[in-house]
Amino acid sequence: MTTTSIITFDTVAYSAKVADTADTKVAGLEIVESLQENEGMLFPFNNTHVTFHMGKVQYPIDILFVKKTSNKYVVSKIIHNAQPGCQEMWSNSNVDAVLEISGGQCRKYGISIGSKCKINTILTVSQEDENGQIS
């Protein structure tokens, strides 16, 4: 089952598949052949320290680290136009979500650190039990 969320900024909205299981968080965009301009993948977290990398993603992406403050989501860090094959890893603390979109979209639509967005779903984090089962 695929969950989709709409993430809305002042200048643009994205329809994002939600990586809401351990498997989909690990695979991420590696299993997506391409992204249209207003598509992405949303990774929900719960005030967590996270690290992201390109892995086997075959196209440039922007990576947005998002924190929840009061009832607003705010971009706290952006990796612009990360390229396929890049071995670098990017981390951020106190993250409530990460949004991956096509490379260059942040600059095109003026999304920057401090930009606010709305996420149309309540983000919940799947939990693994000691047997590795998702609940």
Image: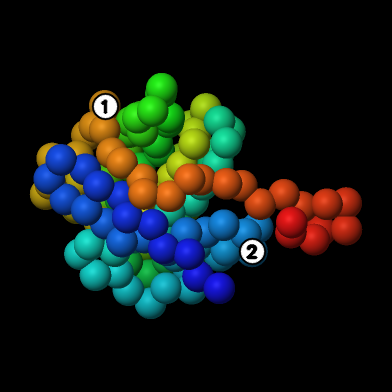
The residue indicated by pointer 2 is: 23
Whether 129 is drawn above or below 15: the answer is above
First in sequence: mark 2 or mark 1?
Answer: 2
At 27% from the left edge and 57% from the top edge, which residue is drawn? 14
Image quarter of residue 10: top left
Residue 92 percent across, percent down from the top left? 48, 32
At 38% from the left edge and 77% from the top edge, which residue is drawn? 33
Q: Can the viewer see residue 88 in this picture?
A: no
Residue 65 percent across, percent down from the top left? 40, 38
Residue 30 percent across, percent down from the top left? 48, 68
At 41% from the left edge and 63% from the top edge, which residue is drawn? 4
Work out how far the residue at label 2 is from the one at label 1, CA to CA, in angstroms. 30 Å
Whether 2 is drawn above or below 18: the answer is below
Secondary structure type for disc 2: helix
Q: Is residue 82 left or right of residue 17?
A: left
Question: Looking at numbered disc 1 in the image, what kind of residue is underneath it?
Answer: Gly
Secondary structure type for disc 1: loop
Q: Is residue 135 left or right of residue 98?
A: right
The residue indicated by pointer 1 is: 114
Question: Of 84 and 39, which appears nearest the observer?
Answer: 39
How many numbered marks appear?
2
Q: Quadrant of the C terminus?
A: bottom right
Q: Can the viewer see residue 12 in this picture?
A: yes
Question: Looking at numbered disc 2 in the image, what kind of residue is underneath it?
Answer: Asp
Q: Which residue in the rendered view is the most extreme toward the right? A: 131
